[in-house]
Amino acid sequence: MDKKNIFLLSDSTGDTINSILRSTLVQFDSKDVKENNFSFIKTKEQIYKILVKASDYDSLVLYTLMNKDLENYLIQESEKLGIKVVSVLARVTRELSYFLKQKAAFASGIQHELDDEYFYKVEAINYALTHDDGRLVWDLDKAEIVLIGVSRTS
């Protein structure tokens, strides 16, 4: 029996769609599923190449594209190629919009936004890694906390 191909398209990291697929697949006995993951989709050309590849197999395309132009292109091209596509966030987004009486932002990667706090954390981690052996002390005055202990005490 041939494997069923599921193509996962995301305009961000793909964590959401991967998690949803895995959570749903456990409800089925089929082990004949091949996942094809494509994240950070930003262009129509990327979508077209993926759809052409998907058309070579018995495929289902699941997506989390927030960009409406890309989503419309995906839907149009998939219809031409006879490929079933499903937005895994459309219904939830629509229902939340009604419930909250707000329009959705339809922006990708908002939950992974690289703001000042993120870069501060990265800088702090790099500082800690640079100084964790106690050899570089020239800028210890920048530390908020200095822990001193015997080597390998954790």
Image (cartoon, helix red, strand yellow):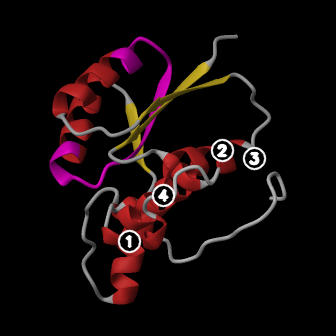
Rounded to the nearest whole Å, what is the CA distance between mark 1 and mark 4?
15 Å
- The residue that label 4 is drawn on is 127
| Three-letter amino acid code of the residue under disc 1 | Glu
**Could you say where residue 63 lies in the image, as x and y percent from the top left?**
40, 44
Q: Secondary structure at mark 1?
A: helix
| Three-letter amino acid code of the residue under disc 4 | Tyr
CB under 8 Å between callouts 2 and 1? no
| Three-letter amino acid code of the residue under disc 3 | Gln
Rounded to the nearest whole Å, what is the CA distance between mark 3 and mark 4?
45 Å
Disc on the earlier residue, 1 or 4: 1
Labels 3, 1: front one: 1
- The residue that label 3 is drawn on is 27
Labels 2, 1: front one: 1
- Look at the image and tell me whether residue 80 can be seen: no
| Three-letter amino acid code of the residue under disc 2 | Arg
Rounded to the nearest whole Å, what is the CA distance between mark 2 and mark 4?
37 Å
Rounded to the nearest whole Å, what is the CA distance between mark 2 and mark 1?
31 Å
- The residue that label 2 is drawn on is 22
Left or right of 2, for residue 62: left
- Label 1 CA crowd tier, 10 Å (few <14, some 14–19, many 20+): few
- Label 2 CA crowd tier, 10 Å (few <14, some 14–19, many 20+): few
**Could you say where residue 88 lies in the image, as x and y percent from the top left?**
46, 53
- Residue numbers of the magenta segment: 53-70
Labels 2, 4: front one: 4
**In the rendered image of this protein, does residue 83 appear above or below residue 130?**
above
- Quadrant location of the N terminus? top right
Disc on the earlier residue, 3 or 1: 3
> Considering depth in this image, is 144 or 12 the residue closer to the camera?
144
